[in-house]
Image (cartoon, rainbow, N blue to C red):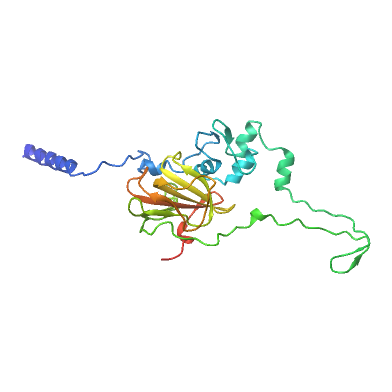
Amino acid sequence: MLLRSSIIILFIFIVGCSSRQSPAPVVDVNSQLPLNKKVRNSLKATEYIVKKGETLYSISWRAGLDVRTIAFVNKIPSPYQIFPGQKLFLSAKSAKASKNKPSRESLQNQQQTVIKKPIASNKKQEYGEVTRGQKIVKKPLRKTGTFSQKVKRWVWPVKGKVIAKFSTKKQGNKGIDIGGRRNDSVKAAADGRVVYAGDVLRGYGQLIIVKHNDDYLSAYAHNDHILVKEQQVVKAGQVIAKMGDTDAERVMLHFEVRFRGKSVNPLKYLPRR
């Protein structure tokens, strides 16, 4: 009886193994998450050496930081040009520890609110009143970076069905996945400029990052091939790539939107359909 039970169990095991039609995805043993998704946005170091093909935007994308933060810490002026082998600090603490922090004057210019109190002379003000020896307090202009710069119009990058939604979990989906067929047209979701086009970022395959303004970026991953170049200006609805499955388990578009370096739900911006 025991022998018969052992034979039955062995038969079921063999049948179960032979029924698998495709190989199991590579999974990280700690999180049970497919490796090609775990490596997305995986740059957690405090210092980084630039590799060939990278831009400051692609590095800030991996680190989940606003590109302006990295540029400020490393004193890199716009348009944020970097070169292979260059050492970048990804936090103010690491820059300070390496004695390469921004100067005190630079910090004051960026952070300090200055209130000027000139002594007014006997002259007419803008509204016709005369001041005699009074102190006029001039308030500084509002910083443009404090307020969100809205994108005028968003459009869907592809027509397919959403097969995976945005997640706020630590290892969750940082955008949405949209199904489709190979070589379907991938379109820019809004007007902007291409700030990265390549395949250096592991987990994204052939990737395009578009800057829409100082606040918003969008990304288009797993393309079969890219039709635009870095620094190229694109319009909403313009075809920028063809859908594929580079570094993915199936043909799809992985689409992300970032607000000041942080992932946000693209469905909050795309029109309802």
Please give the name of the residue rendered at 73% of the width and 48% of the height, measured from the top-left corner. 112
Residue 78 image point, x, y percent: 63, 44
Image height of 273 relative to 49, above or below: below
Residue 190 image point, x, y percent: 51, 57
Task: State the residue in front, 103 or 79.
Answer: 79
Image height of 247 relative to 52, above or below: below
In the rendered view, does 109 fall on the left or right side of 163?
A: right
In the rendered view, does 273 fall on the left or right side of 3?
A: right
Q: Residue furthest bottom?
A: 128
Please give the name of the residue rendered at 48% of the width and 61% of the height, measured from the top-left corner. 268
Q: Is residue 204 visible?
A: no
Q: Is residue 141 visible?
A: yes
In the rendered view, does 132 fall on the left or right side of 90?
A: right
How many marks overall?
Answer: 0
Quarter occupied by the N terminus: top left
Residue 17 image point, x, y percent: 19, 41
Please give the name of the residue rendered at 46% of the width and 64% of the height, measured from the top-left corner. 271
Please give the name of the residue rendered at 37% of the width and 40% of the height, measured from the top-left corner. 35
In the rendered view, does 135 fall on the left or right side of 187?
A: right
Quarter occupied by the C terminus: bottom left
Determine which quarter of the picture holds residue 68. top right
Residue 239 image point, x, y percent: 44, 54
Task: State the residue in front, 154 or 18.
Answer: 154
